[in-house]
Image (cartoon, rainbow, N blue to C red):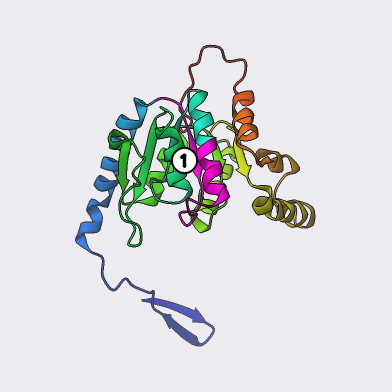
């Protein structure tokens, strides 16, 4: 209870209170830690990967599904593994392209009421299941040497801007982030330039350079390879330092 005097008036205000806090919530941090430890141990041994983001609703006969398969294929040819969310749609396409062409096919599956299990193209020894979106996003970012972002919905936008924020704030080293599909992404980037940058000044002009737009698998993978050109050792390091 809080009491405040204003002249001759006495104003009493009460703070809002939780109706209930479950005791089990105190143990949530241990569940989080277990997911982090399992992810670190498993993904440390896989090697450099590229994360592919995109809609779970994209059907196998859609051009973007086929394009994602081709992107993943070319990534494996360049020695990268592929990380997806493990679900259907673009995620399935990414895992399919990697699995069918001899690359590491990783699925970071999230427990959702409307998505059951992982797609059949995830390597069985590279499936990780998560309760918590934020732990899953750490894994997407820490072990990815680049990001291919296909057309998608709310989840795809969340993942894209999470990565861009980490790069902009230097919480991770700069890595290539490629938007695939000019018919989908051009309007968003134009709005960012006109409204976010020119009208409001909420981003820098160079921030827009972080998200090139391409339309082919060749251009997407070439952008990643060109980014790392000159490193003849073949040794890359994880991005996300949690210390």
Q: Is residue 52 on the magenta stretch?
A: yes
Q: Is residue 240 left or right of residue 201?
A: left
Answer with the quarter of the image where residue 2 lies: bottom left
| Residue 58 position (above or below residue 106) | below
Picture quarter with the N terminus: bottom left
Question: Mark 1 packing: few (<14 Cα in 10 Å), some, or many (20+)?
Answer: many
Q: Residue at x 70, y 51 (%)?
A: 186
Q: Is residue 205 left or right of residue 2?
A: right
Number of callouts: 1
Q: Is residue 67 on the magenta stretch?
A: yes
Q: Indicate the position of residue 26 as horizontal and vertical percent values.
A: 24, 54
Asked whether residue 195 is in view, the answer is yes
Q: Which residue is mark 1?
A: 94
Q: Residue at x 66, y 39 (%)?
A: 210
Q: Indicate the position of residue 144 as horizontal and vertical percent values.
A: 48, 33
| Residue 175 position (above or below residue 208) | above
Q: Residue at x 46, y 33 (%)?
A: 240
Q: Indicate the position of residue 153 as horizontal and vertical percent values.
A: 53, 57
Picture quarter with the C terminus: top left
Give the magenta part as a residue range.
47-70
Residue most toward the left? 23
């Amino acid at each position: 209870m809080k009491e405040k005097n204003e002249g001759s008036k006495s104003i009493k205000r009460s703070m809002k209170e939780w109706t209930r806090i479950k005791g089990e919530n105190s143990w949530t941090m241990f569940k989080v830690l277990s997911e982090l430890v399992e992810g670190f141990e498993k993904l440390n041994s896989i090697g450099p990967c590229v994360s592919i983001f995109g809609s779970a609703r994209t059907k196998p006969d859609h051009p973007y599904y086929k394009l994602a398969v081709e992107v993943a294929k070319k990534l494996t040819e360049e020695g990268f593994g592929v990380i997806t969310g493990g679900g259907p749609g673009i995620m399935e396409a990414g895992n399919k392209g990697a699995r069918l062409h001899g690359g590491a096919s990783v699925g970071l599956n999230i427990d959702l009421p409307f998505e059951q299990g992982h797609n059949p193209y995830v390597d069985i020894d590279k499936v990780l299941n998560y309760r918590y979106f934020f732990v899953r996003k750490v894994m997407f970012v820490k072990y990815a040497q680049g990001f291919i972002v296909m057309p998608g919905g709310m989840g795809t936008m969340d993942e894209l801007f999470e990565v861009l924020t980490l790069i902009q704030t230097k919480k991770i080293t700069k890595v290539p982030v490629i938007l695939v599909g000019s018919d989908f992404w051009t309007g968003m980037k134009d709005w960012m330039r006109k409204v976010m940058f020119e009208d409001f000044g909420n981003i820098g002009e160079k921030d827009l350079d972080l998200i090139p737009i391409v339309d082919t698998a060749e251009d997407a993978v070439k952008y990643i390879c060109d980014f790392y050109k000159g490193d003849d050792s073949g040794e890359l390091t994880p991005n996300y330092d949690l210390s």
